[in-house]
Image: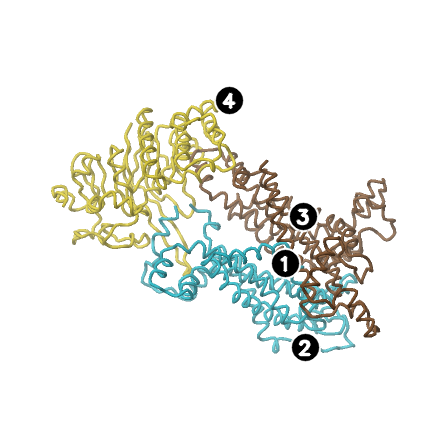
Amino acid sequence: MLEVRGLHTHFLARGFDNQVRVARALNGVDFTVGEREIVGLVGETGAGKSLTAYSVMGLLKPPAKVVAGQALYNGRDLLALSDDERRKLRGGEIALVVQSPKSSLEPLTTVSQQLVRVHRAHRQVDEAAARVRAVEMLAAVGIPDPERRANAYAHQLSGGMAQRVLMAMALINEPKLLIADEPTTGLDVTVQAQVLDLLRDLVRARGMSALVITHDLGIVAQYCDRIAVMYAGQVVESGGVMDVFARPSHPYTRRLIASTPDSLARRGGRPLGGAANPPNLYALPDGCLYADRCDHAAAQCAVAPRADPVAGTHLVRCHFSRQFALEPMA
Amino acid sequence: MALRIFLIRRLALFVPLLLGILLFTFFLVRIGGQDPVGLIAGPTATTAEIAMIRGQLGLDQPIPTQFWIYLGNVLEGDLGRSWISQKPVLRDVLDRFPITLELLLWGTLIGALVAVPVGLRAAFKHDRLFDIVSRSISLLGFSVPTYFLGLLMLFVFFYLLGWAPPGMGRISLMVTPPPTVTGSYLIDSLLIGNLEGARSALGQLVLPVLCVAIISAAPIAKHTRAIALEVMSSDYVRYADATGLEPSARIRIVLRNSRTPILTFVGTELTGLIGTAALIEYVFAWGGLGQYGLNAIIRGDFSAVQGYVLALALFSLIVFLVIDILVLLLDPRTAETS
Amino acid sequence: MTQAVQDAPVVVGRSVRPSVLDYIVGFAKRSPTATIGLVLIGFFALLAIFAPWLMPYDPVAVNVNEILQAPSAKHWFGTDNNGMDVLSRVIYGARYAFGIAVPAVFLGLTIGVPIGLYTGYRGGLIDEVVMRVMDALRVFPSIILSLAVVAAAGPSLFNVVVVIGVLDAALFVRIVRAEVLALRSSNFVESGVALGNPLWRILFIHLLPNAIQGAMAQSAVRGAWAVRISATLAFLGIGIQPPTPEWGAMIRVGAESIVNGQWWVGIFPGVALILMVLGLNMLGDGLQDLLDPRRKSGAR
């Protein structure tokens, strides 16, 4: 369905000392989202999760730039498409749900007009039919009294309602792949669960695939089939949720899991203990990117590890992954 | 309904504001410790005459009493007499206001009609040649002193090229001015079918209006660009990009959401430009409220200065009110919160 | 997605120390606008400092034999209706421009920044009153306000500086207050309060360095405004009077002869005035863009 290979994205900035600095934000991201699969992409803020999604969808603006890699969508490389071709896929076959629903809705246009607009941008339907479809979608995402809500403006909606509207917008064109970028950030805990349940049910019912970006391992455990853990612009460990949680084989994943999901969520995705600072993207080490924060770093770590399987599709980017795989979590 | 409540609230806010404005104009002519009586009475006046005038003006009363008298006078429509024109200030202000308004509205209208599209285009062509060139011109426009622009215009178009009439008033001295209906010589001449008068009035209008247009265009272009860029970096435009809307649909979203902030800015500019336009009037001997006010300030005609400043403040209040109403009608968010 | 960059601390990833030249070129590339502005201001600053050595003639020496001479090898910018050398007067005028703009903006910052810090941090009644007064000030066009107040207060150079400074202060209050409101609940302020720092320390040690940036960028723009307003006053004959070699006063003198074709009397000081104001505006504009990179680059 979606196969991301060796994705590199850099930020270029010229400093006051006339030196161009490169922030290497993505350093070879690899993962796949299979047919009818829900994949969770986890990591700290700044690990490059959202950037991965925006790179794949062709939504980067300068100074960010994809410098290498492929994003194969049903065999077509999204990164090689023209802007126009990519635009037609966005919102049509690949849809995005974002984390700030209220501000992502246009303030001066009603909900239904925005739904109609998205629908008609991708499908040949007339205004009236699109409007019927828009109200249907609002009903499908569980908005009470959809006929009336259709005429509401963004500022009249609660955060949870706005997130549902965004989901309706994402799903109105029956996309094949849904990318949800921290869909529940900023929502009440009870609303979070409702939104995620709904999201899962809709994806399952429509036979879609989904990529869920989150810093909350609990969400991944509960809603996803597969997981990909990101650190410093790389996927350091990926595999089936069961496999990874049962045998986390990268020291970073192990640290993530060890800090309870509860506390992780409370930290709002801020970096975990140990070295307090996130990796310096301007001066990444040559070897393993995690080495300077790793308790188990050794001489070999000066050489960059490859993502090797520990079992089946469970891939880990660490020289000692096999040892970790056998070692139970403390 | 919402509009009515809004208006009542807004007008209620005007009361303390007006009081503050009157307090300001009252003290404005008293901060310098200059004695208006000397100017009114003239250099040959005797001490007794000065004391008499002082008594007539109420200047022998304590300050709070003076303010109370001033307040009462203003409410009765008595803004005092101008010693330059020897007429009631209210009369002068009302007579000259339309003359200034003609210059201001044409100038700002033309300025905005050029600057808003330029600013929008600059935002869409961000950091490209058009943007860089238009920003540079706008910076230059920001930096040219108003009166110097007027002088340059006269030098080039009157002295060098001979295209424009000399900057002396609103209609040629050879032409009989039309009877006053709207106060605009151009419109009034057209109303009575006096084409010669209309031509002359139009000729006199061109350069001053052009000056106001240029002076107003620079900030309008700059802020329009900034507003559109702000909208373009908003979450909802980014999300519109993510839903694969056509470029034309994206442009429409940006335009729709830039509309009210641009309108608000142009309106706010109008209240500042009425001050700037005074300098244009001064250079072109336009004879409107602005020139009247500047002359009053220069020559120390205190009642006229008070009346002028008061008139400008009232003009601003009215413009702000009109903008607020327009925004209320255009933006569903404000309608709800007010 | 600026997060990824913001999160990464900016560290020079190489061993060679950049030279001063690197910094100059780097600054020029980051903001050509600010750089051109600085060059213009620097040029006039040099004129102002070295005026006595640069002026070919005494700027106020009347010469009845050389009245209204067109530009020539002897008088590059010609002479005015007193026979005074326009070039010398333009050069000397730079002193008046700086002499008014610098103290006026300094006064504005001195009054405005502390008030903005205090009202933004404390809020409450004082904040409310100050903001209402600011709102009320908006109804007066600033140019007329300053003209009227200076004329009423007595047209001295000192009054010009004070009036411009006070009007600037109102603007700085707004800017600083807005910054403080955004910073008030941030970690470093809260920890500063928790550690029992006195109010002045919170305001001036913790908040000031973070809240002052916008005001500093705006200072250049306000300087431009101060130069303009003071020249306008002189042009109208309020304040500095001819034959003082001040640009606005020189334009006033030149206005009489410009429509007779003796353009040099008014045009040269006018061009100097434009370039000086342009330099300050460009510096201010460039600095604002540097402080707000989002607006400049439109990057995510």
Are marks 3 and 2 in one subunit? Answer: no
Q: Is residue A101 above or below residue B140?
A: above
Q: Position of residue B72 (x, y in %)?
A: 72, 56
**CA–CA distance in space, label 3 to label 4:** 42 Å
> Callout 3, which amino acid?
Thr
Q: Which residue carries the number 4 mark?
A: A128
> Callout 2, which amino acid?
Tyr
**Relative to B123, is B53 on the left or the right?**
right
**CA–CA distance in space, label 1 to label 3:** 18 Å
Q: Specify the chain shown as cyan.
A: C
Give C14 or B229, whichever is nearer the viewer: B229
Label 2 chain ID: C
**Is the C-beta separation of discs 4 and 1 under 8 Å?**
no
**Relative to A190, is A144 on the left or the right?**
right
Residue C57, numbered label: 2
**CA–CA distance in space, label 4 to label 2:** 82 Å
**Is the C-beta separation of discs 3 and 4 under 8 Å?**
no
Q: Secondary structure at mark 1?
A: helix
Write the residue at 32% across / 40% down.
Answer: A69
Disc 1 packing (10 Å; few <14; some 14–19; many ≥20)? some
Q: Secondary structure at mark 3?
A: helix
Residue B108, numbered label: 3
Are marks 4 and 2 in one subunit? Answer: no
> Callout 1, which amino acid?
Ser
Q: In the rendered image, which quarter is residue B74 located in?
A: bottom right
Give C82 or B255, whichever is nearer the viewer: B255
**CA–CA distance in space, label 4 to label 1:** 53 Å
In this rendering, which labeled residue sits more in front, label 3 or label 2? 3
Are marks 3 and 4 in one subunit? Answer: no
- Give the colour of chain B: brown
**Is the C-beta separation of discs 3 and 2 under 8 Å?**
no
Q: Earlier in the sequence, mark 1 or mark 2?
A: 2
